[in-house]
Amino acid sequence: MKRLSEKKIQEHIADIRLAAKNPKAWKSQYSAFCIPVRLEIPGGELARDDSGAWLGFLAGHKMMGRITLGLRITGEERFWAQGLEGKAAIESTLVSVVSIWDELPKHRRALYA
């Protein structure tokens, strides 16, 4: 998987929002929005409780067994984190991650597709 740039992610967000306004466009593009992605975050982000959407996202992915904990922060992620907390990887789909993307601090998130 390759890390997506912030510019590319914002393009995906714009495409999804535009398609969501038009049922025919949504239906024809939905499969493109469901591509598998991996969201990587510092482990401390799992403890946040300030957002219902974020908590719902985590709960759903936990129930499906799609969260991997205890991964080592290597520095390549460019997180603003000391590395003591480790990182978590969440296997998801593009459309799911886009729904919570703006709720995560910019320097504490990385998305791979």
Image (spheres, rainbow, N blue to C red):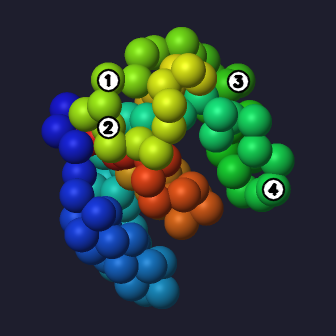
**Which numbered mark, 4 or 2, is in the foreground of this view?**
2
Q: Secondary structure at mark 4?
A: loop
Q: CA separation, marks 3 and 4?
A: 20 Å
Q: Dividing the image into 4 quarters, which one contains the C terminus?
A: top left
- Left or right? Give the position of 79 relative to 70: left
Q: How many marks?
A: 4
Mark positioned earlier in the residue sequence (1 or 4) = 4
Q: Secondary structure at mark 2?
A: loop
Q: Which mark is residue 47?
A: none
Residue 92 appears anywhere in the view: no
Q: Nearer the viewer, residue 59 or 102?
A: 102
Q: Are marks 1 and 2 in contact (CB under 8 Å)?
A: yes
**Which numbered mark, 1 or 4, is in the foreground of this view?**
1
Location of mark 4 (residue): 50
Location of mark 2 (residue): 77
Q: Secondary structure at mark 1?
A: loop
Location of mark 1 (residue): 74
Name the outermost residue toward the front.
Answer: 82
Amino acid type at circle 1 is Thr
Q: Are marks 2 and 3 in contact (CB under 8 Å)?
A: no
Location of mark 3 (residue): 63
Q: CA separation, marks 4 and 2?
A: 24 Å
- Left or right? Give the position of 27 relative to 82: left
Position of residue 75 measured from the top left corner of the image (x, y, whole percent) = 31, 31
- Residue drawn where x is 46% and y is 59% of the image: 106
Q: Dividing the image into 4 quarters, which one contains the N terminus?
A: top left
Amino acid type at circle 2 is Glu
